[in-house]
Image: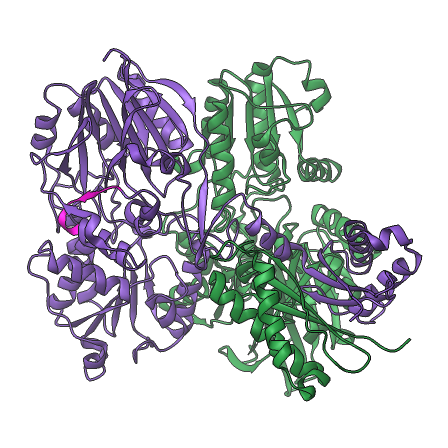
Chain colours: A green, B purple
């Protein structure tokens, strides 16, 4: 028994905002039993992962130990917490536990990847408890920007842990449970060994605001609008959708929900009963017969996503609806860093149509779902843990959060992905660094981020691509012509002659000089041809392209 | 004379922030004489222009009329106002006028592209006047974030115009002239027909702050630091460099300027005498012998540029210097939208080193160089023009700025790039839409943004690339093998077999079925092979790659 240890290992979400995945283990070293908390995705970018569909943590470490994985707990239904379930569950095959609304989304995630939803079980909030090997886990409701979010109380033989999930301290969240300090005080009674705590907004020095503070300003804005009103927010922010819809109804407008994600989320919220008195909506078809000044659309695409409703409306008609002069478009959302360019593109497209665009720059139409620094301190004080382990943040967030906890005299550790902490004793100790990384869903295949495949794409995008075909005949003689094709390079050299021909000439000249040994060896021949093509392009157009050499060796027939 | 008209035509900078280029013309329609104000670049992004080096306005319209272009006036030395001079001057060949510091940079821009700097003439501020065809132009000093910025008073037979350039209302700018309302009132006397006005910060409702408000907070921050202090800002913000350097000196630190752009700008400022009492600096080599707590580095790369000093320091050593635990890094700058990801990457890299990173989120360490909304209104009131033509802004900025001017009873027009306004009468009238666009400096070649070259690169980055080599023999028979190479695609199909071989098999099967007419025709053969390769990839890995088909037709030798 004395050799048992309690360990923590983040595989995602610690050192980044996105793809959350935290492991807890208990048992003799190397024989611990595990639970996983959250199984999320992060989103690709043209900058670092062009063409990729989704990004998940690399789960190799735990997949190799899956016989010791007791369960997967999902704190809430945001993509960065549940989005990888359908992609990765097959390699883990552990039971999945979540509250009702989250479970509904988790099942969808499995089914949309052609898997059975049977692994998912619905759990009631604390005091209901799931036993998973040496762990006893309860869902502790907390307010966030999606219904039925929860932290987790994790009881272990080495002490009680509290994992906040994502949270804010909102006493009037509109939909879902209010922040309940008495509940959190109650679960903390008897002592919390370690608090694993959301760090997203640690740099924000002001106390967070409630969803309820938006009602008045949104109602006023909608009531004062003359044309059609269109508002966008995160589809999963069901409370906001409700706030917006109620403002529309209050102004005598019919409400339309536009965008698949929006309708799915509201449907799941209705089916699980979390929404409570949803305002009636009309379909886009019905909207066609309603005067535009009596319409309010609530649409997807607050982050500028190309195929979502907001972007479609900025380009023209969408499901028979379109914006025009005098309409109002409201971004009831924050632009996630990295999405500024597409969001701004939409704003300017609407400006060109004469649509008035309102965003959150004045702080009237959006509140964050995460606790700010004073709120974090409130929770530190309330829970009074021995240790604080910051999570759900970039490195700078974790570091700042740890600094705050240490100032209060608590132990703290900055543990980015792959850092295994031993929590058995009085202070967190780093005992191992596990190799972690990212997997890419690319088309229908999962590939490793470090496989070089995406790097090759980035190189082609930066440098262009030249293909050179070389043919070696039956007598091992190179045919001195070369066939060249270019993509992503200027068509002409400085002389005005086609670049393709100029490179063909260069390569032909090199081939004419190549000796027999070079021609006989694919690698040598490729090297010589590649260098010739690259040097020609560099000289002619100042680019150093990627070069593919296709060597065809004819055989006597 | 009655047929003469006064026209305005922005080729860049109106409907975007960047690559400013504004034309003014006077004379009979179709025979106007022109002046150009500013000749700037904008910067590429991986998202929309991967691999591109710089972006300039497409100047075809004015290049075709260059015999009627009298002069180019450059308001200040920022890249988005002067950066395209070296790239485009050859096609315009008009004399260039600028104030001394700006002229110094303009000459560099010409010389670094191998051109003579002789075209550039130095002009003193108002009341000195340059006659350029029907125009009389004076430089009216104004405060901005670079030395010797100026607006332009443009006298024409149809009335007097005032072009603000980029400006803020700073009465203590540190370096360069303070905002001088008396001067601006004086040049406005006698009436201004149209004010062409910076719109960048029109959505900011607070009056702008002075550079002088930073001195105290920066000094305090540097004085309180224990390790090495490193600060980054825009290299051209010479006033800020001075504020930072003085804070270092005041704290007993030796100051090092790191980064080519930083040293060039400070050198130009010294040579033209605008800096006035620059604090002494030491070289990186000398810094090696100075204890780190006595050092302050002022470095390039505030926007996260990969090869600038900030990014280099975040990756390790740079010119023998490196950051370590307990050092302080200050972003005395604003992150330009689109640059959040690389800037954040640097912040987190420093966090991992234990370096404390401070940025402007608290508003203490940076002020903008552009006038906010109340400042714009001050200038509207002071100049009291008949018309306001907003420029230097995205469409939404121009629209908002026009709205504000109209509220004051002034005429206003939203005129994005390519909109020709006739200003002869009492109100601006749109008389023509000129085709405008962007040119890309790509390696050593200028290409058109719509040429498809960069689009091809984006497609390769998103979809991957397949090369298929097909050989047709002397008898016009296709050799049924196909040689395939893939780049940016998974190596294996779902069966585990190499993707290349699976595609080769598919193509070979299609070739075996191809009839003689198809084989004889390059286009037909290419279409068939391309389709086969793309379908195979779609089925095997769920990607629809770009396909290059290289058809080699052997000839009897």
Percent from the top left, x then y, of residue A195?
A: 52, 65
Compared across the picture, whether B118 is left or right of B339 comes to left
Residue B173, visible in the rendered structure: yes
> Taking B182 as reference, is B474 above or below it?
below
When asked about the image quadrant of residue A402, the answer is bottom left
Q: Residue at x 63, y 38 (%)?
A: A308
Residue A158, visible in the rendered structure: no
Of residue B461 and residue B528, the one placed in the foreground of this image is B528
**Which image quarter is the C terminus of chain B in?**
bottom right
Of residue A348 and residue B88, the one placed in the foreground of this image is B88
**Which image quarter is the N terminus of chain B in?**
top left
Of residue A365 and residue B145, the one placed in the foreground of this image is B145
Segment colored magenta: B94-101
Compared across the picture, whether B553 is left or right of A457 comes to right
When asked about the image quadrant of residue A75, the answer is bottom right
> Taking A124 as reference, is A266 above or below it?
above
Percent from the top left, x then y, of residue A312?
A: 61, 33
Compared across the picture, whether A109 is left or right of A462 comes to right
Q: Is residue B97 magenta?
A: yes
Percent from the top left, x then y, of residue A222?
A: 50, 22
Q: Is residue A510 magenta?
A: no
Identity of the residue furthest to the front in this view: B557
Q: Residue at x 54, y 56 (%)?
A: A497
Q: Residue at x 34, y 64 (%)?
A: B357
When asked about the image quadrant of residue A465, the answer is bottom right
């Amino acid at each position: 028994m004395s050799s048992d240890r309690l360990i923590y290992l983040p595989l995602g979400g610690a050192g980044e905002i996105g793809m959350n995945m935290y492991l807890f283990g208990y048992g003799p070293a190397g024989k611990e039993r595990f639970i996983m908390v959250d199984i999320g995705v992060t989103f690709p970018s043209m900058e670092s992962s062009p063409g990729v569909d989704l990004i998940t943590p690399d789960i190799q470490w735990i997949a190799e130990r899956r016989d010791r994985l007791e369960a997967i707990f999902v704190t809430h239904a945001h993509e960065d917490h549940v989005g990888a379930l359908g992609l990765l569950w097959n390699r883990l095959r552990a039971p999945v536990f979540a509250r009702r609304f989250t479970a509904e989304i988790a099942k969808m995630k499995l089914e949309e990847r052609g898997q059975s939803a049977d692994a998912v079980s619905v759990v009631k909030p604390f005091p209901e408890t799931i036993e998973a090997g040496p762990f006893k886990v309860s869902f502790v409701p907390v307010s966030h920007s999606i219904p039925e979010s929860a932290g987790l109380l994790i009881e272990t033989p080495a002490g009680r842990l509290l994992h906040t999930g994502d949270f804010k301290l909102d006493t009037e969240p509109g939909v879902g449970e209010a922040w309940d300090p008495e509940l959190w005080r109650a679960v903390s009674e008897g002592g919390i060994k370690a608090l694993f705590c959301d760090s997203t907004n640690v740099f924000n020095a002001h106390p967070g605001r409630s969803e309820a503070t938006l009602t008045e300003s949104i109602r006023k804005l909608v009531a004062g609008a003359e044309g059609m009103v269109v508002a966008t927010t995160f589809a999963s922010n069901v409370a906001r959708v409700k706030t917006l819809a109620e403002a529309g109804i209050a102004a005598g407008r019919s409400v339309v929900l536009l965008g698949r994600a929006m309708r799915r989320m509201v449907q799941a919220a209705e089916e699980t009963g979390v929404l409570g008195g949803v305002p009636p909506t009309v379909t886009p078809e019905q909207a066609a017969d309603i005067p535009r000044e009596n319409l309010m659309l609530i649409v997807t695409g607050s982050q500028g996503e190309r195929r979502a409703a907001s972007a479609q409306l900025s380009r023209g008609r969408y499901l028979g609806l379109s914006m025009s002069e005098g309409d109002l478009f409201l971004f009831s959302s924050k632009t996630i860093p990295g999405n500024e360019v597409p969001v701004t593109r939409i704003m300017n497209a609407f400006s060109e149509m004469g649509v008035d665009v309102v965003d959150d720059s004045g702080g009237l139409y959006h509140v964050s779902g995460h606790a700010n620094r004073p709120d974090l301190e409130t929770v530190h004080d309330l829970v009074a843990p021995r240790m604080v382990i910051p999570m759900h943040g970039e490195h700078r967030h974790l570091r700042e959060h740890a600094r705050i906890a240490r100032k209060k005299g608590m132990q703290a550790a900055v543990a980015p992905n792959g850092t295994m902490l031993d929590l058995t004793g009085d202070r967190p100790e780093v005992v191992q660094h596990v190799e972690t990384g990212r997997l890419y869903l690319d088309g229908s295949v999962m590939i490793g981020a470090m496989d070089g495949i995406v790097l090759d794409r980035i190189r082609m995008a930066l440098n262009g691509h030249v293909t050179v075909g070389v043919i070696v005949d039956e007598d091992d003689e190179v045919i001195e012509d070369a066939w060249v094709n270019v993509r992503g390079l200027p068509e002409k050299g400085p002389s005005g002659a086609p670049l393709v021909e100029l490179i063909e000439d260069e390569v032909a000249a090199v081939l004419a000089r190549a000796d027999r040994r070079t021609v006989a060896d694919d690698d040598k021949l490729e090297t010589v041809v590649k260098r010739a093509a690259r040097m020609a392009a560099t000289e002619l157009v100042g680019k150093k392209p990627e070069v593919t050499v296709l060597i065809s060796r004819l055989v006597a027939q």
